């Protein structure tokens, strides 16, 4: 998905075991949690595993 949307969005992942304060900062309550940021702020969040197509639709609907 990152390759398909290259230039449109940046996609990253984080290991919460290595970054234990980040989930608390953003109110993460489940894993996986997908977060969409706009201008440095959380614009939208999804919790739980989603198929690639659903993730792409979600991102495209938010940008």
Image (cartoon, grey):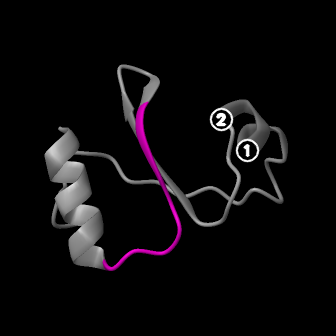
- Residue 57 percent coordinates (x, y): 18, 61
Secondary structure of the residue carrying numbered label 1:
helix
What count of labels does the image hold?
2
- Determine the residue positioned at 63% across, 55% down: 14
- Determine the residue positioned at 84% across, 47% down: 20
Label 1 neighbour load within 10 Å: few <14, some 14-19, many 20+: some
Please say if 62 is above or below 51: above
Residue with the most extreme bottom position: 51
**What is the number of the mark on residue 23?**
1
Residue 52 left/right relative to 41:
left
Residue 18 left/right relative to 62:
right
Q: Is residue 38 visible?
A: yes
Secondary structure of the residue carrying numbered label 2:
helix
Gap between marks 2 and 1 measured at Cα:
5 Å
Q: Which residues are magenta?
A: 43-51
In-front residue for pair 46/4: 46
Please say if 7 is above or below 63: below
Residue 56 lies in magenta, yes or no? no
In-front residue for pair 62/9: 62
**What is the number of the mark on residue 26?**
2
Residue 45 lies in magenta, yes or no? yes
- Residue 53 percent coordinates (x, y): 21, 75
Q: Is residue 7 visible?
A: no
- Residue 55 percent coordinates (x, y): 29, 65
Residue 50 left/right relative to 61:
right
Please say if 30 is above or below 45: below
- Determine the residue positioned at 82% across, 55% down: 18
Residue 16 left/right relative to 26:
right
* Image quadrant occupied by the N terminus: bottom left
């Amino acid at each position: 998905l990152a390759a398909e949307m290259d230039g449109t969005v940046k996609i990253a992942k984080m290991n919460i075991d290595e970054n234990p304060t980040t989930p608390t900062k953003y109110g993460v309550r489940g894993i996986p949690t997908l977060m969409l940021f706009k201008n440095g702020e959380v614009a939208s969040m999804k919790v739980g595993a989603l198929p690639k197509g659903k993730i792409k639709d979600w991102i495209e609907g938010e940008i």
